[in-house]
Image (cartoon, rainbow, N blue to C red):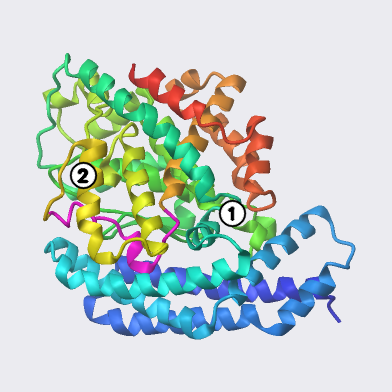
Amino acid sequence: MPNAYQQLTHRFQRLSRFAHLGAIAGWDMQAMMPPKGAAARGEALAELRLLRHQLLTEPVVGDWIAEAKTLPLSSSEQANLHEITRQYTLATVLPGNLVEAQSLAGSRCEHAWRTLRASNDWASFEPLLKEVVNLAREEATLRAEATGVSRYDALLNLYEPGMNSAKLDTLFGSVKTWLPDLIQEIMARQARYPLVTPQGPFSTSLQRETGLDVMKVLGFDFEAGRLDISAHPFCGGVPDDVRITTRYSENDLFSALFGVIHETGHARYEQNLPREWRGQPVAEARSMGIHESQSLFFEMQVGRHPLFLKQLRTLVLQHFPQQPALEEDNFIAWNHRVTPGLIRVDADEVTYPAHVILRYEIERALVEGNIEVGDIPDLWNEKMQASLGLSTQNNYRDGCMQDIHWTDGSFGYFPTYTLGAMYAAQFMATIRQKMDTDEIIRTGDLTPVFNWLNSNIWNKGSLLATDELVKQATGESLNPDHFRQHLITRYL
């Protein structure tokens, strides 16, 4: 008979296979499915999610965990058991009917968001979001009671284990003291050098071809993934079949292109998770902060590097005719512009933290019950004006309806973007100490950089806690000074 630990690994292998099906069905729902399929697909995904919840929370799983803790396991097996225990503990807090209700409400809200955002229809969107928020609060209350932390911290723990709002308040509070002045200083400096604006239209099909070329340079495995279109860019699927998406505008050459670079960072991480542990929790990404560090490493640390931008320009000119805006100096400077804007996914890396902090402050207040859904538009406008000097009054499309995350109840996710930017800067600072990154990027062969990421981040999966992973890779815990110094060095 298999021992208790072997029983657990078999159960989690089954759970992984069901998750695989759910991931592909979810990708199809956002990228390929015709609109009339939404209700049936939402029900099917809810049924699958409920099935996984039932398999994970059976009492026998708890018995196996208790017995497995008495067995002589290797350090890697102990790490896997730790992650198994974490997933079991998180799951058993929630009743199955809540899991099913959240899945259904999230599917309804996300599907409606696609058209309601386009029509700027907050009035129709608000009741759908209220349902999602009420269920998220119910989940947060159950998790808070089980763990003794705040409701928001209980949800944050799902995405970034080991992090809490007190730490975030310290990290983000520091950023808020220096970011506004830095933005103004950079903008004043850049205003002295007028730029030529790229003139479209830029064919969607040619933008796609350019994106595919960049994905090749960045090492994406096309035998284990693909690129498609969705209403909001994302990376989904599974390590052997990674699905990334972007969205195109024929008036903007760079939004989709850098979206592809961002999602390729997520994809490379997924494609290089430890294959020998496939199907087990330790083969999963460590946290969303680490996941976002990879996408932002690709998009910002590498993608906006002046020497990489020179190569990117060459690829662009293989598909689009030369014009004054695509002259080398203008091309690089255009992609280093620091300009406050309404849309987070199009934001430059200097103003980006302001978008994240705004969302963190709103969603925390929302989960804790200090504000209601109806308060979001005015609060969003108030915070946007305070941080970036922009108004979203009555502009819900480019304000509080622009992101997909809240539609499915992903509260606690947004802070991981700026945590990811901080981790990415720290990783690059470490890599620079070990190799001549400028020369590597100049040559166009990024293999040494990717090898470092693979050895220190990707193939570690969840074998280590986040802090230990970062310490082993860089020699220190998260140090936000690297991020600030990166911005000063690049832009001043």
Residue 335 screen position, x and y as percent: 26, 29
Left or right of residue 389: residue 299: right
In the image as oriented, which residue stretches furthest toward the front?
Answer: 370
The foreground one among 56 and 384 is 384
Residue at point 66%, 58% (across, down): 282
Given residues 447 and 126, the one toward you in this image is 126
Quarter of the rendering occupied by the N terminus: bottom right
Q: CA distance from mark 2 to mark 1?
A: 30 Å
Answer whether residue 250 is visible to the viewer in this image: yes
The part of the image, by quadrant, that contains residue 200 is top left
Q: Position of residue 418 (x, y in %)?
A: 43, 41
Is residue 52 magenta-colored? no
Identity of the amino acid at label 2? Answer: Leu
Element on which disc 1 rests: loop
Q: Residue at x 50, y 70 (%)?
A: 141
Residue 410: within the magenta? Answer: yes
Mark 1 sits on what residue?
A: 161
Label 2, secondary structure: give it. Answer: loop
Give, as a single range, the part of the protein colored magenta. 395-413
**Residue at 37 percent of width and 42 percent of height:** 261
Residue 43 location (% of width, % of height):
38, 84
Q: Nearer the viewer, residue 401 or 232?
A: 401
- What numbered label is drawn on residue 342? 2
The amino acid type of the residue labelled 1 equals: Pro
Quadrant housing the C terminus: top left
> Which mark sits nearer the N-terminus, 2 or 1?
1
Count of numbered labels shown in the rendering: 2
Task: Pick the residue in front: 387 or 485.
Answer: 387
